[in-house]
Image (cartoon, rainbow, N blue to C red):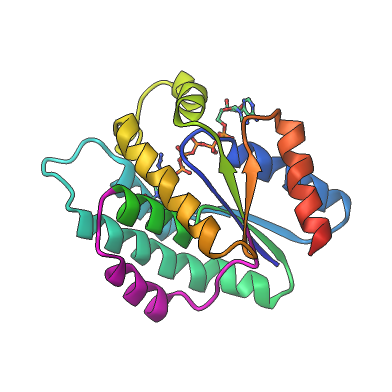
Amino acid sequence: MFISFEGTEGVGKTTLIRKLHEHFQHLAKDVVLTREPGGTPMAEQIRSLLLSVNHEETMSNDTELLLMYAARAQHLEAVILPALAADKIVLCDRFTDSSFAYQCAGRGLDREKLKVLNDGFVARMPDITFWLDAPIETGMLRARERGALDRFEQEKATFFEKVRSGFAEIHENEPARMKRLDATQTPEQVFQQALLHLQQI
Ligand code: Z5A
């Protein structure tokens, strides 16, 4: 099973993934915990490039999109597809929905570009996606206690509102795959919401 986790910054994806990881391990399931952009040494290098604020030039929106998919192609081939072929459970922090929400809804890139990349380079979509949804300010407050902000975190709240509406659009179009979790609840309550959906499938 391939499970992805989506949402704007600081909504609690990592926290939920850790809890589910523990839960599956107790059930003696073979679980792979991974993230995007990243998940392999090469893809992690691309992640550093994407998140860095120390570039001498502005990264174009097209470059950002293509780097996300370069990292994803490597991640799919080296980690996700082999794990699924070996019947493991893959828990992935962000996947293609983030590209739609951030690069298309947020940055305003043409959706046709994303479709070409998804059709050409994404051999497998998640079986279920948890969209952790909370008001932008809630996530920002939680995340920003960590200190230095990366290239995405430096964006304004209006950008993240667009990103949130991008996730809402996917949820509306694909309710069977994407499940909305109320991320304003406690970590334990968010975990219980996710478990309920997993039991249903
Ligand atoms: N990006 C993109 O643009 N396009 C793409 O295709 C992909 C990604 C794949 C890096 O992602 C950036 O890449 C991301 C979008 C872009 N940028 N942004 N923004 P990332 O996932 O690494 O970055 P992030 O979203 O900023 O992750 P995060 O800040 O680590 O958030 P999180 O994992 O959702 O939250 P958390 O670490 O679990 O929790 C944050 C804090 O809140 C922490 O102190 C927790 O203890 C606390 N927390 C968690 N849950 C709760 C609840 N329920 N109540 C109270 N407090 C809580």
Asked where in the image residue 149 lies, by quadrant, the reply is top left
Q: Which residue is at 29% across, 71% downward? A: 112
Asked where in the image residue 171 lies, by quadrant, the reply is bottom right
Asked where in the image residue 14 lies, by quadrant, the reply is top right
Q: Position of residue 102 (x, y in %)?
A: 36, 50
Q: Position of residue 12 (x, y in %)?
A: 59, 36
Q: Quadrant of the C terminus?
A: bottom right
Q: Quadrant of the N terminus?
A: bottom right
Residue 195 drawn above or below residue 75: above
Residue 41 drawn above or below residue 151: below
Q: Which residue is at 50% across, 78% downward? A: 123
Q: Which residue is at 21% across, 36% downward? A: 54
Please tell me which residue lies in front, 190 or 2.
190
Can I make out residue 40 in this image? no
Residue 51 drawn above or below residue 73: above
Please tell me which residue lies in front, 108 or 6.
108
Residues drawn in magenta:
107-129
Residue 23 lies left or right of residue 6; in this view the side is right
Q: Position of residue 41 (x, y in %)?
A: 45, 56
Can I make out residue 99 in this image? yes
Say if the magenta span includes residue 61: no
Residue 129 lies left or right of residue 35; in this view the side is right
Say if the magenta span includes residue 125: yes
Looking at the image, the residue that sits furthest to the front is: 172
Looking at the image, the residue that sits furthest to the left is: 57
